[in-house]
Image: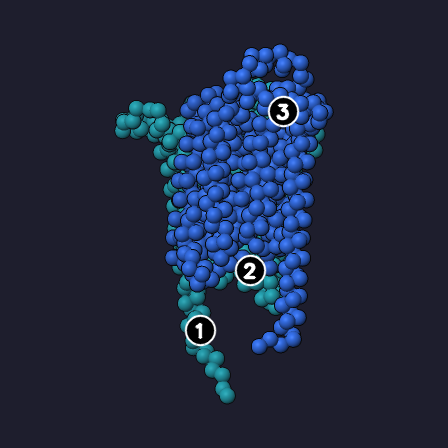
Amino acid sequence: MQTGHDVINKSSLHIFRAEERHRTRRLLVISIAAFVLLFAFSMCLRTSQVDLISPVVAMQNLFTWLKLVVAKWLDLPLYLESEAIISKLPFYFETVARFKISVITVVSGMMLALAGALYQGVFRNPIAAPTMLGVASGIELGILVMVLKYANAAYSMTAKRYRYCYSFALVILLIVMLTGKIASRGKKFAVTDMLLVGAAISQIINVLISYYRFEMEDELLIVFQEISSGIYINIQTISFIILGVAFIVSVIPIHLLRYSFNAVCFSDDDAFTMGINPRIIRFIALICGTIMITAAMVHCGNVGMISLIVPHICRYLFGSDFKKIYYASGIFGGMLLLACRDISGLFYFGYSGVLPIGSIVSMIAAPIFVIVLLQQRKGWE
Amino acid sequence: MQIDFGEKNTFKDEETRRLGVSKKNRSIVILAISLVLVYIYSVFFTVNLYGNNLSLAWYLQIVSRKIQDFSNFILSRGATNGIHFTIFRHMIVVLVGAALAGCGAVYQGLFRNAMAGPSTLGVQAGGLLGGMLYVYFFTDSSSISIKYSELQAAYQEMDVFHRNMQGICILVGCFVGIILVAGISKMASRGKLSTLPLILTGFLFSSLINSVAGLMQYYMVLTNPGDLRSNAMRSLMMGTFDNTFTLEHLLLVGMPILVCLSVLLSLRSKINVLVFGDDEALSMGMRVNLFHNILLTVCTIMVAVTISFCGQIGFIGLIIPHIGRLLVGPDYRVLLPTSMILGGIVMLLVYSFAISVGYGSNINLATSLISGTLFIIFLITYRRKRNADWA
């Protein structure tokens, strides 16, 4: 039997929910529009290497490129005239290269932010980012070994770089997690201990890396810095294919399991009552998150801080629903990394022409990290 | 209701306490003797084994030559083959180890956190940043070492400000580092310094500075290949005792460190009170803020001195107070001198190990690998115990 009070409450709740849904939808539409605008803007932006490109020219270039790609695939006669067509267009190669780089940047940013949202949700800890668990230094170690072994050829060996970086990152992640488990004495949740051990191990690895940085010859140092700090981005077809495969493999399982994740993010007991095994879910999240972040950092260099801060921005805007945060952080992560890329293109440094993207990311991310640290209400233990 | 004060018991406790202290003093004496032994070992019996044909006869020959050199140096006749440089350098090693370990012990007591130390609090990273900025912006591209050992003539012509420019830069960097890291993590943990924010903020700060160093190196290589400033950066980042070997250097390093160490030692009973907490110390009639600030400033100055002469030497300051606490317990009256002497011993051992495997000029590598592993083990044991105060 319903009392009047209950009825009023229910109806008001209904209205509230409708309002919230409306608000979320509006925010999503706005952010997608901003994303598209930013992408278009970054096509025409003036950088250290290229002057301002008018949007019309950029569009024309991109359409021509698409047409030529299709013509190449289908063996159309148009492809034979491609050189004549290209020679008429101003900034053709620059636009195409920038388009490819922007696509890689956006996808990497998305994967980073998604991995951050995943880790934070599953571990229920605001600073549980994969980079904090030693993955970043593992990737750097992988790149270092690769550069020492293959020298200049390390630039173009995307598949091999993947193999090295994945193996090193996985080994270090495993060491950190096992040590954290030992430190927490078989308790259910060992995140704090894992974070501490991860920080210590990464510091040791950083010393090792800086030693080799000083030992290397100058040419090798340039190769290592350009790959590991994201100055150089490989835009061969193979890197697109690998990135796409990694994206699909890691994002689709999470998309299919999004409701289970909501339960796991809430608490383990609730997940059990709903018939979900949180351990399996957490394991899937770990695997997918590591795939995502390693792929992104192999392509874009040391930009792991994105994964730490973007979920917080999204939680501030969209509330604490995992589903919403997950999709929103995808959009915002891509946007933020692209914006950082654009900013880094504006500067002129040395002879290479760009400031590394990682430094701008950490400049933006450090204050946000401090705010996140300060806002934690309960104690840290 | 009667309260039994138990006069006899008090007397007994007093007796045992005194006995305990004397026992601990004995351990300090034993440590000091072993320091002397280790010093002799590392001066005379440490040889670079890397890339040599190892044989006992060869080893004995080198050792006997060293002893011969030493007797020549003492009697001031004949060739000394630079044995006095080795002696001074190893003295500097002992001083630096003692300084870092003392700093670590004091930091851990003041912040009441077992994981505080010069490397985790961002002091070393901040000093490193200051030093690197000095090297990048204020020196010309031909200066090889961080300290003016090669540039004596140019050093004579400088005014006071420029002579001390590097020291000032490093000192300011150290203070900025500790204020940033300790301040942020203290604010984040609401007054008391918790381990997780401390370690994470320190780690992020130091990795940020590491990447800044990488970038500087990269642009130096791009714009000016063969730039000798990268050697200066190397000796800052990797930590080396190669630039400090004369008596002058020994005095330059030793005077400030000895003054600071004696200040710390004279205040060690105050640290004992400060460990209990601010309220306890206030109720005992102590000026908490004053002593807190004095101790922090002295420690930070000491770390800045070690960085400006020997570069970054990680994890030593963090580990040695723990070993000292295992040996003599948490009483700072005994713990502080113990950890200073232990610091000297461990630093000598690590340095002679690094020399014998051929990494003598990259001391930070050796200390980080050895004591970083120890640090992780201590971290695990402390987390497993989860004591309320030392979490």
The CA distance from mark 2 to mark 1 is 43 Å
The percent coordinates of residue A325 (x first, y second) are: 58, 50
The CA distance from mark 2 to mark 3 is 53 Å
Point out the image quarter for the N terminus of chain A.
bottom right
Viewer-closest of B233 and A335: A335
The percent coordinates of residue B272 (x first, y second) are: 53, 60
Look at label 2 and name its amino acid: Gly
The percent coordinates of residue B36 (x first, y second) are: 41, 43
Q: Residue at x 48, y 80 (%)?
A: B5
The CA distance from mark 3 to mark 1 is 92 Å
What residue is shown with label 2? A379
Is disc 1 on the same chain as disc 2? no
Q: Earlier in the sequence, mark 2 or mark 3?
A: 3
Chain B representation colour: cyan
- Describe residue A203's horizontal placement relative to residue B290 as left or right: left
What residue is shown with label 1? B11
Task: Say which chain tag 3 marks.
Answer: A
The percent coordinates of residue A119 (x first, y second) are: 50, 48
The crowd level at tag 2 (other Cα within 10 Å; few <14, some 14-19, many 20+) is few
Task: Report which quarter residue A80 is drawn in.
Answer: top right
Asked if residue A318 is positioned above or below residue B138 in the image, the reply reads below
Circles 3, 1 touching at the beta carbon (< 8 Å): no
What residue is shown with label 3? A62
Asked if residue A136 is positioned above or below residue A219 in the image, the reply reads below
Chain A representation colour: blue
